[in-house]
Image: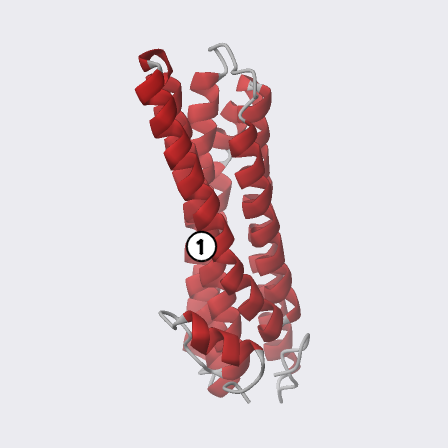
Amino acid sequence: MDATSLGPHISRRFNEDLEKLRTHVLQMGGLVEKQMSDAVVALVEGNGGLADEVSRNDHRVNAMEVSIDEECSRILATRSPAASDLRLIVAIIKTITDLERIGDEAEKVGYIAARLAVMERPTDRYREIKNLGRLVHQMLHAALDSFARLDADAALKIVQDDRVIDEEYEAIQRQCITFMMEDPRTITRSIEVLWVSRALERIGDHAKNICEYVVYMVHGKDIRHTAHDALTRQVMGEDLR
């Protein structure tokens, strides 16, 4: 399987089915990416209307997951795909599950943003959440791009980037605990910030999962639970060739 093509098949219709399937996954990815971005903007800007919109749109993500899952089942039943085609279908089924969960996490952020919108915003305007949200959005966008291009090398590098997200999340945790200890009046807001940062960290985990599926699609290798040193060797091309 090359970087952008799914490869030729005897049936032109089969080619079209697979390309359409991949396109639908990317459309779903674009929707959850926008959900996640809008949720962070709603929180940082105190935009309750945008926060409510994020929460209301979650049903669209759910509907897309069901539709794509049904299409995968149809292809499995009628085409009996093998080798790289079967890996593609399996990876897509897993990917849409992670995308749906990203939508759920964005919905959580939207709910919290709506609650915080009626409270006085802190002077730093949730700078820590804005920064974490930017990092997670970049990671999610890059993960979807690697899926679109079937770029396993890029996907492996993105998997390693998840450590940056984890470190930022841990820093926010320490900061919130310090605020609550120093001033009990900040407890309510700090707990909400902790929930938001946890949701964003989980989105980063799901983006990482998508990248692992890309490697599986391209190379047939399952890199889940692989140690950092082994991943480094894979990025350098020592294990996946």
Residue 68 visible in the current orientation: no
- Across and down, in percent, residue 171 comes to 43, 39
Report the number of numbered marks. 1
Residue found at x 56% / y 18% = 46
- Across and down, in percent, residue 120 comes to 50, 10
Q: Is residue 89 above or below residue 100?
A: below
- Across and down, in percent, residue 223 comes to 42, 74
Tag 1: residue type? His
Q: Is residue 64 above or below residue 227?
A: above
Q: In this figure, which residue is indicated by the disc labeled 1?
A: 206
Residue 160 visible in the current orientation: yes
Q: Is residue 140 above or below residue 186?
A: below
Between 101 and 40, the one nearer to me in the picture: 40
What quarter of the picture does the N terminus occupy?
A: bottom right
Secondary structure of the residue carrying tag 1 is helix
Residue found at x 56% / y 62% = 158
Residue found at x 55% / y 39% = 133
What quarter of the picture does the C terminus occupy?
A: bottom right
What coloring was used for the rendering?
secondary structure
For residue 41, what is the image quadrant? top right
Number of residues whose C-alpha sits closer than 10 Å to that of mark 1, classed few (under 14), some (14–19) or many (20 or more): many
- Across and down, in percent, residue 79 comes to 48, 81
- Left or right side of 162 for 139: right
